[in-house]
Image (cartoon, rainbow, N blue to C red):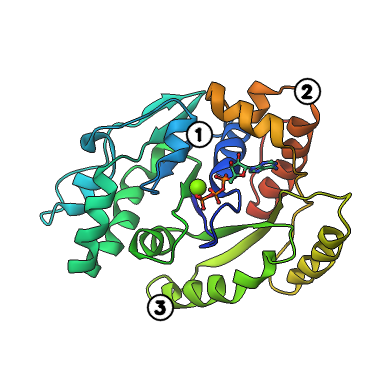
Amino acid sequence: MQIITFFNHAGGASKTSSVRDLGYLASEAGLRVLLLDLDPQASLSRWLGADNAPNEQTVMNAILDDSKATPLPTPLEVFGMHLIPSGDGLRKLEGQLYTNSTMTSRLKRLLRQVGGSYDLVLIDTPPSTGLLTQMALIAAQGVVVPVPVVSKGAEGIPTVQSLIEDCQEMNPSLEIKLFLLTQYNPQIRVDQEAYKTLKQLEALAPVSTPITFRKAPYGEAQAIKKPIPISHKGEAADKDIRHVALEFFAVLGLVVRG
Ligand SMILES: Nc1ncnc2c1ncn2[C@@H]1O[C@H](COP(=O)(O)OP(=O)(O)OP(=O)(O)O)[C@@H](O)[C@H]1O
Ligand SMILES: [Mg+2]
């Protein structure tokens, strides 16, 4: 089982969209996929039709249990994947993590307990460097950093690296697996320049082919609560994400059916 955290503290980088669509494509390719929504905004859960999850369906109780007897909740089934959704409970959980930061290492153990059931766990994080995000980085083997291809896209990378370095103290093998370039508008000259700059991240970790900015499909997919490869099957947005999914599988060394 590989546990991959999607992290960029910058808001709106396409973390949640990427977890939804790459998770779906991994599952379509025959992998057993668990999605874990650790963002109190709960966008991932909402976009997959799991709105307003009660606390019992979130990771909250399992993390808070000092006796360590509470397992992860039974996940929901969405489009062939499993999902542990977010809900209001995660705001409460975040507050508790600040009172006892040793709790941030509990997610790793809880995921190990379900290791036999999954090939791939994808964790969606909030746009912050707070303790929910740190918990997700401490639990993971790898990080995917979604970066929008815009002029300020690279600005947050030093903070991303610095938080990963902090978390490596508790999780030494944590590494960036992929810079996932998103929201690229190839007609805009400053975005072309941004793309050139972001390609230089290759010195740190692999950099994906950029996913094109396509406003309508992304809005529609959210509205009808489906991943892009279902809502816009065969269309340009679907082809884009499928191409990047192959790069994602390759950097993880995942063998998937063709
Ligand atoms: N390739 C794209 N083309 C057009 N819109 C996109 C694309 N990717 C994502 N979006 C839109 O951009 C917005 C931000 O994306 P998303 O919510 O996935 O990012 P995020 O990093 O999870 O945001 P947050 O930091 O708030 O959690 C969403 O409205 C989403 O629909
Ligand atoms: Mg998000």
Would residue 51 be found to the left or right of residue 99 on screen? Answer: right
Foreground tag (1 vs 2): 2
The quadrant in which residue 41 appears is top left
- Name the kind of residue labelled 2 in the image: Gly
The residue sitting at 44% across, 62% down in the picture is 128
Position of residue 208 relative to residue 59, above or below, is below
The quadrant in which residue 179 appears is bottom right
Q: Nearer the viewer, residue 23 or 125?
A: 125
The image shows residue 253 at horizontal and vertical percentages of 65, 51
Give the mark nearest the N terminus, 2 or 3: 3
* CB under 8 Å between discs 1 and 3: no
According to the picture, the residue beneath numbered tag 3 turns out to be: 169
The image shows residue 256 at horizontal and vertical percentages of 66, 36
* CB under 8 Å between discs 1 and 2: no
According to the picture, the residue beneath numbered tag 2 turns out to be: 234
Give the mark nearest the N terminus, 1 or 3: 1
Q: Quadrant of the C terminus?
A: top right
SS state under label 3: loop
Quote the CA–CA distance across marks 1 and 3: 30 Å
> Mark on residue 32?
1
- Name the kind of residue labelled 3 in the image: Glu
- Residue 257 makes an appearance in the image: no
The quadrant in which residue 178 appears is bottom right
